[in-house]
Image (spheres, grey):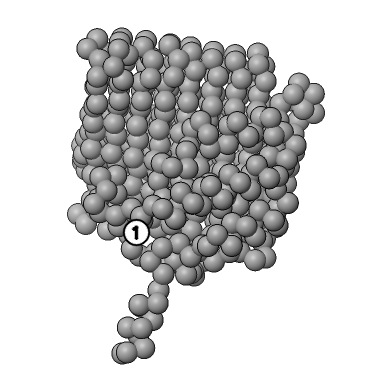
Amino acid sequence: MVAAIQGRTRAAQTPVCTIDDVKALSERNQEPAWLRESRLAAWELYEGMPMPGRNDEAWRRTDYRGIRWNEAGRVISAPGGLHQVPAESLEPLIGDEQGGTIVFVDGKLVQFDLHPSLAAQGVIVADLLTAAKEHEDLVRPRLMTQAVLPHEGKFAALHAALWTHGVFVYVPRNLAVELPIHVVMFNSQPGQTMGHVLVTLDENAQATVLVDYASDSADQQSLFVGATELLVGDYANLKYVCLQDWNRDTYEFSTLRGRIGRDARLDWVVGNMGGEFVKQFIEIELDGQGAFGRVSGMFFADGVQMYDQDTQQVHNAPLTSSDLLFKGAAKDEARTVWQGMIKSLPKMQKIDGFQACRNLVLSDDARMDAIPGLEIEADDVRCTHAATFGTLEEQPVFYMMSRGIPREEAELAVSEGFFEELLERIPFPRVQDRLREALETKILGRRRS
């Protein structure tokens, strides 16, 4: 008994990283001096911050005490290879071609392709470490300086100090990239990875990007600390899809933010299916007059999964519009939290903001919380919000059963119909089908390990 108590006492209560890990990572990557200094400055911020807890508003409904930091924070010493990535994650998104493909396994780059026509036009799709060395003029002013900032939180600072891998996408001015860009971050082993996405569209540029996060099943815990930065220049148009299907032993802490310029558009789809615990801060900043941002989120928690998603729509300019719709379901003993906020700064008149979270509760022991909010400091605005909760409707189920459809198939059809509006916002039919299969697995109770 004494030994057991001592073992619990020795268990880490915070990530098991040190400044020596930061220095070793930078040296191993042979990083330029500016990046090393940036990491060390972020580590100093990290050390000065307490771990977030129930006394912090953004975390008071969040319990991540189940994570075993000594186990989840273990650095993966022997990364896997491309052959371990599921075939469906590598197939072309549209037709037989893609604009660019970049694949990481356990934080290591294992595949890179860029369509010759895009490279000839100045489009950059590269792993972030290479981009930091070869395109310092583009990366340095943007990497965690405009969107996600290290001082914003404990995990943002940790990521800035120790990100392990990432992708940099750059589309020059006045260029429309028709072929999609596909990024895969796959973990074949348990342990710690920290992936970064930095997408920059110059003025009047256009692109479509899909990022897949997934992992093999494991019998040990894993940790993913992520950051996503979407910089959409004036008059630019970005379609961005990020889908997560971690195994049931992964804990994720991520900060995702898009900044949208004058008369620019960001159409963003977020999907969460996997993981044991997921905490995400998702934010759009409408910086230029006429900017438009749409965020579509779908999530389905079962077993004892915990999803906590905190969204913000910040109107920093007048005549801007934002539209946010999240739809989620929970069954078994799962728990979900969505907390949203629309913010308008003083004098930011004639803005139009909408947010809604629709929740489908599929078992008595599941719990779903949805908390919309407004913080308006202007007097000529139109901002609305809504949150709804419901169970599976018996009327359409009975209707289909009366026509010979078995109950299980009827319930599946009704549940899938609940998400169809969001599935149709994903511009890749093959990806839509993949998500429908994931939903079917959840609804029918065939849980992934």
* Figure quadrant of residue 292: top left
Q: Residue at x 25, y 54 (%)?
A: 54
Expressed as whole percent of the image width and height from the top left, the position of residue 9 reads 35, 77
Q: Residue at x 70, y 53 (%)?
A: 29
Q: Nearer the viewer, residue 82 or 118?
A: 118
Left/right of residue 335 with respect to residue 78 in the rendered view: left
The 10 Å Cα crowd at callout 1, few under 14, some 14 to 19, many 20 or more, is: some
* Figure quadrant of residue 105: bottom right
* Figure quadrant of residue 424: top left
Expressed as whole percent of the image width and height from the top left, the position of residue 322 reads 37, 21
Q: Does 6 sit above or below residue 310?
A: below
Left/right of residue 379 with respect to residue 440 in the rendered view: left
Q: Is residue 393 visible?
A: no
Name the residue that disc number 1 marks. Answer: 64
Left/right of residue 419 with respect to residue 28 in the rendered view: left
Q: Nearer the viewer, residue 300 or 119?
A: 119
Q: How many marks?
A: 1
Residue type, numbered disc 1: Tyr
Which part of the image, by quadrant, shows the N terminus?
A: bottom left
Q: Nearer the viewer, residue 272 or 86?
A: 272
Expressed as whole percent of the image width and height from the top left, the position of residue 253 reads 43, 50
Q: Residue at x 68, y 45 (%)?
A: 33
Q: Is residue 208 visible?
A: yes
Q: Nearer the viewer, residue 412 or 170?
A: 170
Q: Residue at x 41, y 41 (%)?
A: 152
Q: Does 446 sit above or below residue 381?
A: below
Q: Secondary structure at mark 1?
A: loop
